[in-house]
Image: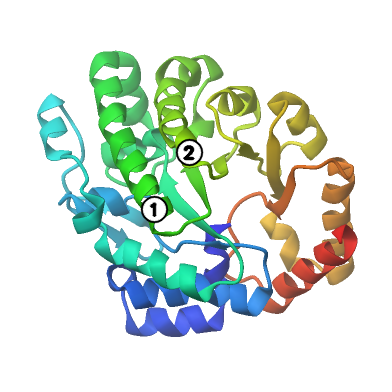
Amino acid sequence: MRQAGRSLPEFRALRERHSFAELVASAELTAEVTLQPVRRLGVDAAILFSDIVTPLAAIGIDVRITSGVGPVFDEPFRSERDLDRIRPLDPDTDLAPVLAAVRILKAELDVPLIGFAGAPFTVASYFVEGGPSRDYARTKALMLGEPALWHRLLERLGDLTIASLRAQVGAGAAAVQVFDSWAGTLHPDHYAAHVLPASTRVFTALADLGVPRIHFGVTTGELLGHMAAAGADVVGVDWRVPLDLAWARIGDHAVQGNLDPAVLGAPWDVVAAEADAVLAAAGGRPGHVFNLGHGVLPDTDPDVLRRLVDHVHARTT
């Protein structure tokens, strides 16, 4: 997952000297942070260092990444007037440092680079709530109470996601991952009616690029069938659903997952046994991308991460 670098001492050393905004604004620093986990851990792909709200910030929406909190908006989305704040994205200008970083990484990596963006619902949830939320009350109230406005909001945010990912692929990304991190807060019927159409539109708009498309969310066990229907090639699974059961819900798609990140704090024999359990649930079936079920916890020992990568390689090659 994209947070692999945050447990690394070399990343923390950079963060002591640079804010998150400075890292994202510099192509060289973005590339360096993206490369750090690949160098140290020996993983099979890199994922672009960025944030879900980067396209919104790029078009002039006032958002800052607050340490220990996440994205914070001083002027959240509240009414139809706020739609005018979401102008179309011009990737070559608005995302110039991001695309420059992708080109640097394309030249330096010997593994594929995965592009990164937030799904319309999750980006909307931050924008409507003004930041992270436990209950998403404002988001759900807007979604259910003003469905026409809600769908227009998701359409505009979806346009940002599409433009960003298409540009990343054009610059050299070999796959794309769309993070709908907080979709699991929704009832399946609400997801199907008010979120699935926007996500489907995103994946449909990327289909002609010919690169693998990954769809990931957290606590989405009851949504996996819907998420697969959105059109991605790969569906991410967190640790709350056994992988074999999740795969049955997903159907004829590849799956990504799903070791609990907290397991990495246990003794090595436990880590190895839990990783083997994930592989056993996959049953050797083609199309399993071994991964954590969510991001690396900041206090995770990098040596354990490297040992896990080596362990999985030994079991699967």
Where on the picture, by quarter, is residue 39?
A: bottom right
Name the spot of residue 101 as percent of width and height, x first: 37, 68
**Residue shown at 48% from the left, 21% from the top:** 191
**Residue shown at 30% from the left, 15% from the top:** 147
Element at label 1: helix
Mark 1 to mark 2 CA distance (whole Å)? 28 Å
The answer to whether residue 102 is left or right of residue 313 is left
**Residue shown at 15% from the left, 27% from the top:** 79
Q: Nearer the viewer, residue 112 or 63?
A: 112
- In the image, what residue type sits under mark 1? Gly
**Taking 103 as reference, is 171 above or below it?**
above
**Residue shown at 58% from the left, 61% from the top:** 112
- In the image, what residue type sits under mark 2? Trp
Q: Write down the residue under mark 1.
A: 170
Q: Nearer the viewer, residue 77 or 89?
A: 89
Q: How many marks?
A: 2
Q: Nearer the viewer, residue 177 or 15?
A: 177
Name the spot of residue 12 as percent of width and height, x first: 47, 80
Q: Write down the residue under mark 2.
A: 182
> On the rendered image, what quadrant is the N terminus found in?
bottom right
